[in-house]
Image (spheres, helix red, strand yellow):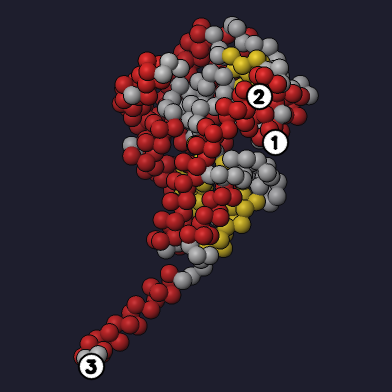
Amino acid sequence: MDRRKFLAVTAVAPLAAPSIARAQTSFAWKMTNAYGPGSPFYVEGPGSPKDFCDKVAAMSGGRMTIQHFAAGELIPALEGFDAVRGGAVEMNAANAYFWAGKLPAAQYFTTVPFGMNFQGMTAWLYHGGGMALWDELYEPLGLKALPMGNTGVQMTGWFREPIEDIGQLNGLRMRVPGLAGKVYSALGVDARVLPGGEIFPALERGVIDAAEFVGPYQDRRMGLQNAAKFYHTTGWHEPSTTGELLISKQHWDELPDDLKMIVKSACMAACLESVTWSEAVNGEAMTDLVDNHGVTASMLPEPVVNALREATMDTLATEANADPLVRKVHDSYMAFKANHDRWAGASERAWLNDIIGV
């Protein structure tokens, strides 16, 4: 090597050393979860938080490891928000609508009744300004959030008697979180937020009269068909339910850029893998519930759906008028939805209704 070139290389080498050392720094984090041990989708399986942790470790070559704790293993189910904010753990897996009492606008980052499906919701988050609004909402609290997982359309839920008239909702005790819970409350429902592991015993013992959870596969695994036999399928309340990876902003900022990209990529993979897994297993589960477990699956009557839609519009307007941040997120979501609805009507809806006749 030419002596002058050698001296030039060795002269800059010390300047490069700190960045090399930083790139090799390892990070050992903890993640808590709002859902109980063994839960498919929510804890383990394709696109789950445990799957996410494995992907991060593999993609980072072991430089970043995340120890996962299901609900009750380190903290109770719904205390992850405070645990991350308080510095007890670096991450928590849950759904943003669980934090409605702290941040009403957070509900929009899980799902909106009569809102967008998986395609629309994910498009709004990544390409319609949703992620920037999520950051704006959480950053003052020292938090960062990423979408991690999606169930697709959920079922209205399990009832002891079929809902044939909107008046039947008055006085009903039902497990239902998020904005849908507020809609139900406006119609006289005693809406309750229960962790997943508490739903079956509450329904079986008569503590609640009805419950929604996810969809056929998850609901069957939980045994909800053994506590109620009427399964309303109309997914008005959660047309697409996004999971949330909550991260300490302080710890997020300490990650080098390549590890941040790995975390983001693993989250995006989780969204795709989880929603496609849900699509793969729900059909068989629905058939099994109806054919082998005595379940009656049916749409809600149109007058009931119309009443729910009207109550939803009133509830969303009330929420938006009461909080400037809710208004900002609401307006962004609805403006994007208006355009997406036009496209969905010309593409997905037309194909489903007119081409294959679903």
In this rendering, position of residue 74 left or right of residue 46: right
Q: Which numbered circle lies on residue 3? A: 3
- Marks 3 and 1 sit apart, C-alpha to C-alpha, by 70 Å
The residue drawn where x is 39% and y is 31% is 120
Residue at 63% x, 32% y is 218
In the picture, measured across the screen, residue 285 lies left or right of residue 316, that is right
Quadrant hosting residue 197 = top right
The residue at 51%/27% (across/down) is 153
Sequence-wise, the earlier of marks 3 and 1 is 3
Residue that lies at the very extreme toward the front in this rendered image: 356
Contact flag, marks 3 and 1 (Cβ < 8 Å):
no
List the residue tagged with mark 2: 288
Front-lying residue, 49 or 352: 352
**Looking at the image, can residue 84 be seen?**
no
For the residue marked with disc 1, what is the amino acid? Gly
Sequence-earlier tag: 3 or 2: 3
Vertically, is 256 above or below 301? below
Q: Residues within 10 Å of mark 1 (few under 14, many from 20)?
A: some
Q: CA distance from mark 3 to mark 2?
A: 77 Å
Residue 108 image offset from top left, x and y in percent: 46, 32
Three-letter amino acid code of the residue under disc 2? Asp
Give the numbered dot on residue 197: 1
Above or below, 169 relative to 28: above
Drawn side of residue 345 relative to residue 37, left or right: left
SS category of the residue bearing label 3: helix
- Looking at numbered disc 3 in the image, what kind of residue is underneath it? Arg
Tell me the SS state at disc 2: helix
